[in-house]
Image: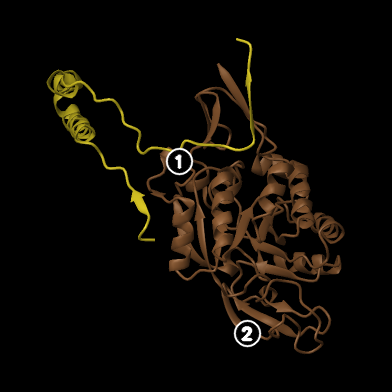
Amino acid sequence: MTKMRAEVPTPTPEAARRRFLAALGAALGPILGGGLVAALVGPLATRRQEPPEEPRRALSLREADYYRPHDLAG
Amino acid sequence: MSSVTCELCPRGCVIPEGAAGDCRIRVNLGGKLRATTYGRPSAIHIDPMEKKPLYHFHPGAQIFSLATAGCNLHCLNCQNWQLSQRGGEEMEETYRAEPADIVAAAIEERCKAIAYTYSDPIVFYEYVYDTSVLARERGLTNVFVTAAYINREPLRRLCRVIDATNADLKAFDDGFYRRVNGATLKPVLDALVTFREEGVWMEVTNLVIPTLNDDLAMIRRMSRWIVSELGANTPLHFSRFQPQYRMRNLPPTPADTLRRARTEALDAGLRYVYIGNVLGDAGSSTYCPRDKTLLIGRSGFTITDYNLTADGRCPTCHDKIPGVWS
């Protein structure tokens, strides 16, 4: 078993930041009102450009057996 | 746009570029079908052989068992739905293990067999095949635990490297297969006959679900078909249903229902009929069909008595008991 490497996805810092802001918004929203919270938290949540989502892990690209390629019109 | 038709299982999925087949893990990328979980198992355990269940194949042995995500059936009562009804990229944990890694790990763990199991290994066919070839070369045996919804040609090729199978026969009713499993009956029957023709040691499991497939007349028809097409020496396991997944509205199968099913199958001519998932039931043990000598006693997955001779005979009448005992 030691020869195998388990791959467990870990949240990126960006994902953690978004989760924190979402939780903050959910907590403050009922107190301050949704519009105010959106005005305060929204710019924070959208300031940075999202990095491209990386695939959780590389899937195998092994070609399968037993299939038939064909072109469909259109 | 180049689509492909997957010819592995009777579904025959026509898969557009970028999409997956019904099993979720065979994906058309650039006009080529890819097996996306090859070398990416998501479940690895060491089990007793009796858990597969195989009762006539190396009893008591430990078997290295693995699965990847995905399945070509969608059983409402699936007990491994977190694994089977997801694609490889959706799993919380995945190992990287090429076939050689699996074989080396099995040997390191002192297992003499490898099981492809949990989800349906049909969908990770290439991984099963390549691992099985290497396992054979290292003196291990291969066990294929399946619902047998596979086309004949790929199955015949696979049978060359598989030593034993436990194949589900979920009901002797096409309507049941369509409603509960999202499949059909005939390809399954054809696959079971193929296993027999190819000489793979086979045991059959029928999970008995209250009100859905516990009709004794159907069980009698199924048992007679097994006798005529697979042989009276084919072990048949009646397993107890537990409420799971999308079928939590039904109760567990009463033990008496399983006992009646067992009696029906024995009356139909089957010689080795077992009850599964009922701890300590006498129907879980193996008896000599001729003189009723207890040959192998079982409680759960544990062997409590072992009275077979070294060459697999009844110690009383010396009849040869079918199986792989060495």
Q: Mark 1 points at which residue?
A: B88
Q: As shown in the figure, which amino acid type bears the numbered disc 1?
A: Gly
Q: Residue at coordinates 75% horizontally, 60% vertically from top-left? A: B199
- Earlier along the polypeptide chain: callout 1 or callout 2? 1
Residue farthest to the front, as pictured: B137
**Residue B108: percent from left, percent from top:** 43, 67
Q: As shown in the figure, which amino acid type bears the numbered disc 2?
A: Asp
| Left/right of residue B78 with respect to residue B319 in the rendered view | left
Q: Is residue B244 visible?
A: yes
Residue farthest to the bottom, as pictured: B316
Which quadrant of the view contains residue B13?
top right
Colour chain B is painted in: brown
Q: Name the residue under label 2.
A: B305
Q: Residue at coordinates 71% horizontally, 77% vertically from top-left? A: B286
Quadrant for the C terminus of chain B in the image: bottom right
Q: Residue at coordinates 57% horizontally, 19% vertically from top-left? A: B2
**Residue B191: percent from left, percent from top:** 74, 48
As drawn, the chain in yellow is A
Residue farthest to the left, as pictured: A40
Which label belongs to residue A37? none
Secondary element at image label 2: strand
User: Can you say whether B109 is above or below B248 in the image?
Assistant: below
User: Can you say whether B93 is above or below B89 in the image?
Assistant: below
| Left/right of residue A73 with respect to residue B42 in the rendered view | right
Q: Nearer the viewer, residue B78 or B129?
A: B129
Q: Is residue B150 visible?
A: no
* Distance from the alpha carbon under mark 1 to that under mark 2: 42 Å
Read off the chain for label 1.
B
